Image (cartoon, rainbow, N blue to C red):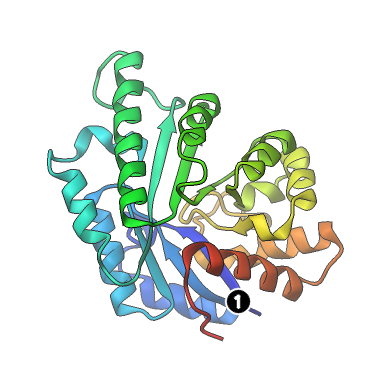
């Protein structure tokens, strides 16, 4: 088995001190590589450290839209310097989040404008550094799409934790982007999403856990971890009528091409 968890938060406080045991369980589950995702400069720096310490871990660096109020004025330069680290394979997660209320006490429109400023600055850095980006969108798909149309063809992007319609996914793919599925696709309430994930071309989809969040069935409601991406792979393989080994090989090949990382197996 050769699975990649393309989106985990190994620097999360919920996972601190457990890297060794988490990676052991990954090996047992056939998860060979993990991309650990940044949400602000501090955890981005920790991701860089984790990648340096563990052969199977790669990092992204970025500022999540819900974190834009708590970074210093030098945040962009800090990300630029971190992005020079040899195992940084992307920027993000970045984007727009209209689900959570303003975290800085401002009015919603001010909060959304601030998020957009950070989003666009990180996209510009990605183009400068020629790195792919990991996109967060929550109740903001129209505005995210409008911004991403402006950079289509200039930056590779994966829309993480995709929960939209098949038509929305196909529009993203037509623009040259990728979509990634979490354990949400295994939920009984997400039948339409499962249909979507079963129909899209394998060269445009990836798998992720979003650890420590969104554990798949049969572990829903528990703390998630990278080894659990296997449950999502098994679910989608059954839906697509193929072996889990074949699905793992295809989605891992897509991930390696997207993030430009080499195989460990």
Instruction: Classify mark 1: helix, strand or loop.
Output: helix
| Mark 1 nearby-residue class (10 Å; few <14, some 14–19, many ≥20) | some
Say left or right for 252 vs 20: right
Where residue 185 sits: x, y (%)?
68, 48
Q: Quadrant of the C terminus?
A: bottom right
**Image spot of residue 152 (x, y percent):** 51, 41
Q: Residue at the far right: name it.
A: 241
User: Measured along the vertical axis of the image, is residue 207 above or below residue 101?
Assistant: below
The N terminus, quarter of image: bottom right
The residue located at (27%, 55%) in the rendering is: 43
* Nearer-the-camera pick, 241 or 120: 120
Provide the residue designation for mark 1: 29
What residue do we see at 67% from left, 37% from top?
A: 171
State left or right for residue 85 relative to residue 161: left
Residue 51, percent from left and from top: 33, 72
Q: Is residue 221 above or below residue 103?
A: below
- Furthest-left residue in this view: 73
């Amino acid at each position: 088995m050769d699975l990649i968890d393309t989106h985990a938060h190994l620097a999360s406080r919920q996972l601190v001190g457990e890297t060794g045991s988490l990676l052991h369980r990954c090996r047992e589950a056939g998860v060979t590589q993990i991309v650990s995702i940044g949400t602000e400069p501090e955890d981005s720096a920790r991701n860089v450290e984790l990648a340096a310490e563990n052969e199977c871990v790669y990092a992204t660096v970025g500022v999540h839209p819900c974190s834009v109020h708590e970074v210093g004025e030098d945040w962009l330069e800090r990300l630029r310097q971190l992005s020079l680290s040899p195992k940084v394979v992307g920027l993000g997660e970045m984007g727009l989040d209209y689900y959570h209320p303003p975290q800085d006490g401002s009015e919603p429109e001010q909060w959304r404008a601030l998020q957009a400023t950070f989003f666009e600055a990180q996209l510009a850095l990605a183009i400068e550094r020629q790195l792919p980006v990991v996109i967060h969108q929550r109740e903001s798909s129209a505005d995210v799409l409008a911004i991403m149309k402006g950079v289509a063809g200039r930056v590779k992007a994966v829309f993480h934790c995709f929960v939209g319609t098949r038509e929305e996914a196909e529009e993203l793919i037509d623009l040259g982007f990728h979509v990634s599925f979490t354990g949400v696709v295994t939920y009984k309430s997400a039948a339409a999403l499962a249909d979507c994930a079963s129909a899209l071309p394998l060269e445009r989809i990836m798998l992720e856990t979003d650890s420590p969040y969104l554990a798949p069935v049969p572990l829903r409601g528990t703390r998630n971890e990278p080894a659990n991406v296997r449950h999502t792979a098994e679910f989608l393989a059954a839906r697509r009528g193929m072996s889990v080994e074949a699905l793992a090989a295809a989605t891992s090949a897509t991930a390696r091409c997207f993030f430009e990382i080499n195989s460990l197996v």
